[in-house]
Image: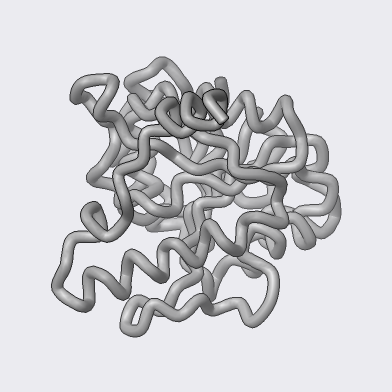
Amino acid sequence: MQIGMLGTGNLAVALSRAWSTAGHSIVVTGRDPGRVVAAAEQIGTTATSALPGRFATRVDVVVVAIAWDGLEQALRLVGGPEGALAGKTVVDCTNPVDYATGRLLPETGSAAELVARVAAGAHVVKALHLFAGASWPFTGEADASPIVALCGDDAEPLDRVASLVADLGARSAVLGGLAAARQVEEAAGFVTRVVAAGANPRWAVPDVDPTLLRAADADR
């Protein structure tokens, strides 16, 4: 698969390296041409750089790994409002959180819904915003692999993103349509607040086995 990476930071490079190892090709673009070339070189021989105006025509899936304050500008740069991404699966990894306070930055809606508005006609899936770049690829035991929450309105793009998540060594869970993305993004704010309080967020949520819950429901 030709994966288009919109972004040149640590998460973009880490995801691209992991997907390259899984056999995918990467096309990188961004706002700074020098950083685009440097990111492609960091990823390796399976990656090439692209001018923003030519990016969309070269890729099957677009992964958006951009800071919140540059998100709309980056999407406009690759022709989102003009329909350049129409029909494509677009994975939004944006983490729109104030890291000092944990506050979600969009006053309403979500970063994923902003992507859907600006990238006219794209099939947007929210995913991969909760884990740092160092998390990928996961190489431990399968039953201990991370679970990546997905939100999206269309079955085929969700399946495609779930396959890409599996290529990272992780599992996925579809939590709902794109309207659920705000809650998923707020989870990142919760994690930020727990870390700021000096605690590990791994222990801040209950350990719930869904199979036991289903069994209890069946016995009622």
| Res. 100 in view | yes
Picture quadrant of residue 18: top left
Location of residue 158 in the rendering, given as x and y in whole percent from the top left corner: 65, 32
State the quadrant of the C terminus: top right
User: Who is closer to the viewer here, 14 or 131?
Assistant: 131
User: Who is closer to the viewer here, 36 or 72?
Assistant: 72
Snapshot colouring: one colour
Instruction: Work out whether 86 lies above or below 113.
Output: above
Give the residue drawn at x 69%, y 31%: 157
State the quadrant of the N terminus: top right
Side (left or right) of 60 relative to 153: left
Picture quadrant of residue 99: bottom left
User: Who is closer to the viewer here, 119 or 163?
Assistant: 163
| Res. 54 in view | no
Location of residue 173 in the rendering, given as x and y in whole percent from the top left corner: 52, 35
Give the residue drawn at x 53%, y 75%: 69
Q: Residue furthest front?
A: 220
User: Who is closer to the viewer here, 126 or 193?
Assistant: 193
Instruction: Work out whether 142 lies above or below 97.
Output: above
Location of residue 124 in the rendering, given as x and y in whole percent from the top left corner: 69, 45
Give the residue drawn at x 30%, y 44%: 207
Picture quadrant of residue 13: top left
Side (left or right) of 140 relative to 190: left
Location of residue 184 in the rendering, given as x and y in whole percent from the top left corner: 53, 57
